[in-house]
Amino acid sequence: MRYEDEIKGKGKQVKGAAEAKLGKLANDQNLEAKGRQERAEGKLQETVGKTRRKVGDAVKEVGKKIAS
């Protein structure tokens, strides 16, 4: 799937944000830290997915220009 990393990354961000808030409400520093980490991982995964997609699009464009 073309947008798989972007979608999974967004999901991790949402889950991480929820865990961080729950940890803060419950005064659980470990859960809060785990949530922040998961959110950061999700952001990174989304960025990797966007970059991979953009590079793929650029390669296709170059291929089209070479073929024509």
Image (spheres, rainbow, N blue to C red):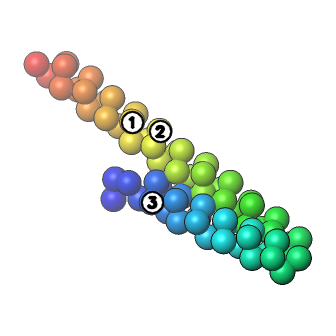
> Quadrant of the rendered structure where residue 24 is?
bottom right
In the rendered view, tell whether residue 29 sits above or below residue 5: below
Say what secondary structure mark 1 lies in: helix
In percent of width and height, residue 58 lies at: 33, 29
Q: Are marks 3 and 2 in contact (CB under 8 Å)?
A: no
Three-letter amino acid code of the residue under disc 3: Ile
Q: Is residue 17 left or right of residue 14?
A: right
Amino acid type, label 1: Lys
Q: Position of residue 17 (x, y in %)?
A: 67, 65
The amino acid sitting under disc 2 is Thr
Residue at 19% over, 19% down = 65
Left or right side of 50 for 38: right
Which residue is under mark 2? Answer: 51
User: What is the distance, in whole Å, between disc 3 and disc 2 at their CAs?
Assistant: 13 Å
- Which corner quadrant holds the C terminus? top left
**Label 2 SS:** helix
